């Protein structure tokens, strides 16, 4: 009996040990997270955060692996600026912007009076930041910032943001459950990071709370307030699309050079509509983001104010152009240059239509290259024995154009498997442009730590 019992207890012990081994990493991680959170208390306390607020904020805290993944995300496909502009200034976003302009006419009028900021710019920022509040990010801000700190990912950025976020919570502007944002803690309709919120958010409707998450007047007033302190000049535009003189030497382009508009005009640079510059003495810089074969711009003071919202010139150009389109202006007169690796919107849309026709992806072609398109391109490249880089090139477009339509057009799951099948009628890369999500973002996006305040 004893001989039988001994192996049995050994088996039990072995089972227990296996369980402990399985549980240990989770237990260790929880203990580490707890220790990390406790290490954040002194800074919070000295900033005036109460222990009750701190405990409420971190109750049940565990790091969010999706935040780490998003923070470390390196896009395999970096969008050329023309493709970025096409995406953020899509026809749909222009149309929605016009509706939002009409819906909020009285509010925008009062913001123009109070802050001197053009209503079209306010609506455009709202559109680019959160798609007019549709995609404000659904990650708890305390958890995201705590994760960035406790995993050592962009901790330097996240520490002051966390203290600021705790103070917002303590003040009662928002409850912990609703304090959501992007992976980097950019919050609400306007995607303010906590320190920007603390300094510039506005209680427009007078209920005592600065609610940029749920209250459109508070959110839009906060944007106007921030632009005003960013040196926005009332009654002026952000810049002009211009035509360069024939043979213009691209070496003369230096974005840092500021000259009066009149001086640029003397070099033969004119507005695309042929009109004179309203104030020839205004200082402007020449911006030629895709080379002298693409659109060129003279940028004014207010462009530099938009850059305070987000340091990326592509972002500021997107906001300025969306504002103009919402006002009723047309697309840029000069088109973005295309070549083997820079396809036009029409070419990208055609590319997706052909991938869909081959059963390699589903959805509605919209010319926005996202993960679903990249996976479909890879599947096609594999099937043809080509190098697999997922890059939608002109050569591949031509190859697809010469394919006969397949007999049985049923979408197959793409090789990567990361992209769920799209519902019928959805954009081919639906959900991939959420500014707070894992989608590739332009450099220096608002929610990213690079934001300059
Ligand atoms: Ca309010």
Image (cartoon, rainbow, N blue to C red):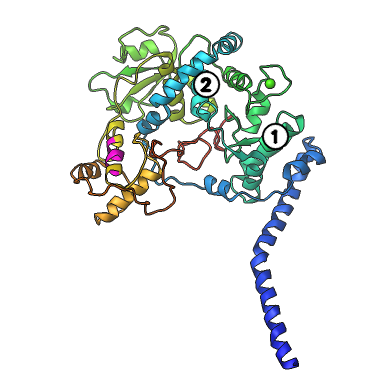
- State how far apart marks 2 and 1 are (Cα): 24 Å
**Horizontal arrangement in the rendering, residue 167 relative to residue 370 (left or right):** right
What is the number of the mark on residue 305?
Answer: 2
**Whether residue 451 can be seen here:** yes
Instruction: Point out the image quarter for the N terminus.
Output: bottom right
- Examine the rendered structure and indicate whether residue 195 appears above or below residue 74: above
Q: Find residue 195 and report its horizontal and vertical position in percent.
A: 65, 31
Please tell me which residue is depicted at 54% across the width and 11% down the height of the picture. 105
- Examine the rendered structure and indicate whether residue 161 appears above or below residue 21: above
- Crowding around mark 1 (Cα neighbors within 10 Å: few <14, some 14 to 19, many 20+) is many
* Residue segment shown in magenta: 350-355
Please tell me which residue is depicted at 57% across the width and 10% down the height of the picture. 106
Disc with the residue nearer the chain's start (2 vs 1): 1
Is 353 covered by the magenta stretch?
Answer: yes
Q: Find residue 325 and report its horizontal and vertical position in percent.
A: 40, 18
- 233, 93: nearer the viewer: 93
User: Can you identify the residue that label 1 sits on?
Assistant: 164
Quadrant of res 10: bottom right
**Whether residue 160 can be seen here:** no
Quadrant of res 361: top left
Q: Are marks 2 and 1 in contact (CB under 8 Å)?
A: no
Please tell me which residue is depicted at 71% across the width and 16% down the height of the picture. 206
Where disc 2 sits, the SS reads helix
- Examine the rendered structure and indicate whether residue 21 appears above or below residue 119: below
Where disc 1 sits, the SS reads helix
């Amino acid at each position: 009996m004893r001989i039988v019992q001994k192996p049995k207890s050994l088996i039990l012990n072995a089972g227990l040990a296996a369980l402990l081994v399985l549980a240990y990493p989770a237990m260790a991680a929880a203990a580490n997270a707890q220790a990390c959170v406790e290490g954040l208390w002194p800074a919070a306390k000295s900033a005036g955060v109460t222990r009750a607020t701190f405990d409420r904020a971190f109750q049940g805290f565990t790091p969010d692996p999706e935040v780490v993944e998003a923070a470390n995300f390196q896009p395999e496909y970096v969008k050329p600026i023309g493709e970025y502009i096409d995406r953020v200034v899509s026809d749909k976003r222009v149309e929605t912007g016009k509706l939002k302009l009409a819906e909020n006419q009285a509010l925008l009028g009062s913001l123009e009076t109070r802050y001197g900021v053009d209503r079209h710019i306010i609506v455009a920022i709202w559109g680019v930041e959160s798609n007019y509040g549709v995609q404000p990010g659904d990650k708890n801000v305390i958890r995201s910032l705590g994760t960035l700190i406790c995993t050592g990912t962009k901790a330097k950025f996240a520490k002051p943001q966390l203290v600021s976020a705790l103070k917002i919570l303590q003040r009662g502007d928002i409850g912990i459950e609703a304090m959501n944002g992007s992976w980097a803690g950019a919050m609400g309709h306007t995607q303010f990071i906590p320190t920007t919120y603390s300094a510039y958010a506005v209680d427009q409707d007078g209920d005592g709370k600065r609610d940029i998450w749920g209250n459109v007047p508070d959110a839009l007033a906060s944007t106007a307030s921030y632009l005003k302190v960013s040196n926005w000049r009332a009654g002026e535009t952000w810049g002009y699309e211009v035509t360069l003189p024939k043979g213009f030497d691209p070496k003369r382009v230096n974005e840092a050079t500021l000259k009066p508009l009149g001086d640029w005009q003397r070099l033969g640079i004119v507005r695309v509509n042929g009109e004179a510059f309203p104030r020839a003495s205004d200082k402007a810089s020449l911006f030629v983001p895709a080379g002298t074969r693409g659109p060129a711009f003279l940028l004014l003071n207010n462009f530099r104010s938009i850059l305070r919202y987000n340091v990326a010139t592509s972002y500021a150009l997107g906001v300025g152009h969306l504002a103009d389109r919402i006002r009723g202006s047309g697309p840029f007169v000069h088109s973005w240059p295309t070549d083997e690796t820079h396809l036009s919107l029409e070419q990208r849309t055609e590319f997706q239509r052909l991938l869909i026709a081959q059963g390699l992806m589903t959805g509605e072609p919209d010319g926005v290259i996202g993960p679903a398109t990249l996976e479909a391109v890879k599947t096609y490249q594999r099937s043809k024995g080509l190098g697999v880089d997922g890059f939608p090139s002109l050569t591949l477009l031509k190859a697809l154009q010469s394919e006969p339509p397949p007999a049985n057009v049923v979408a197959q799951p793409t090789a990567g498997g990361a992209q769920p099948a799209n519902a019928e009628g959805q954009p081919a890369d639906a959900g991939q442009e959420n500014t707070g999500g894992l989608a590739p973002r332009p450099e220096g996006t608002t929610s990213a730590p690079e934001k300059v305040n």
